[in-house]
Image (cartoon, rainbow, N blue to C red):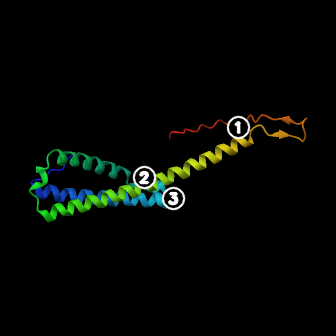
Amino acid sequence: MAIAASDAQDRVEQLIILTERLTELVARSAQSFEEGRPQDAAADLEETTRLANVYRHESARVRADPGLVAAASLAQRTRLVRATEAFDAVLARQGRAIEAAKTITEGLVKAIADEVASQRGQSVGYGPQSAQTANRAASAITLNQRA
């Protein structure tokens, strides 16, 4: 899907609206992660994905042909630059929030895996003659170090 603009002014105005909407959606997503409620971010995922694809496509078009926006007024192009700067800032915020959530999740998985491992093969009884028991009910757990 692409922007259907009649001229440079119209294109820049649509890009501003698109960028501001994406900024709003990503900020809401970042806030969900910051508050420890990543499931709330899923509510806007479809719209965010659709608009991000349009944004990516239109950004590439303008980069390839700056003439698409060159005839727009300086004030309008400045608004677009400001909207893009705000979008970049909110993307960085979301990146930090997602990285923090990932670190916390990895820590929890490691703690659970360590606890499961410590529960396996515990000795029954006391002293050197005590027997090791095999915990047959334990299930395997896999840690992906690259995730």
Q: How many marks?
A: 3
Label 3 with label 2: CB-CB less than 8 Å: no
Q: Residue at x 85, y 39 (%)?
A: 124
Residue that extends furthest to the bottom in the rendered view of this protein:
75
Label 1 sits on a secondary structure element that is loop
Is 40 situated left or right of 21 in this image?
right
CB under 8 Å between discs 2 and 1? no
Marks 3 & 1, CB-CB < 8 Å contact: no
Residue 38's place in the image compared with 124, above or below, is below
Question: Vertically, is 79 above or below 98?
Answer: below
Q: Which residue is mark 1?
A: 138
Please report the residue visible at 51 percent of the width from the left and 39 percent of the height from the top.
Answer: 146
Q: Is residue 53 above or below residue 80?
A: above
Residue 28 lies in what quarter of the image? Answer: bottom left
Q: Position of residue 69 (x, y in %)?
A: 13, 54
* Disc 2: CA contacts within 10 A as few (<14), some (14-19) or many (>=20): few
Q: Is residue 4 left or right of residue 85?
A: left
Q: From mark 3 to mark 1, how far is it between C-alphas? A: 30 Å
Q: CA distance from mark 2 to mark 1?
A: 33 Å
Residue under label 2, please give it.
Answer: 42
Query: Within 10 Å of the Cα at label 1, are there few (<14), some (14-19), or many (20+) other Cα atoms?
Result: few
Left or right, 39 with respect to 23, comes to: right
Kindly identify the amino acid type of the residue bearing the numbered disc 2.
Answer: Ala
Q: Earlier in the sequence, mark 3 or mark 2?
A: 3
Among the two numbered marks 2 and 1 on one chain, the one whose residue lies closer to the N terminus = 2
In terms of depth relative to the viewer, which is nearer, 50 or 63? 63
Reading the image, the residue beneath label 3 is 36
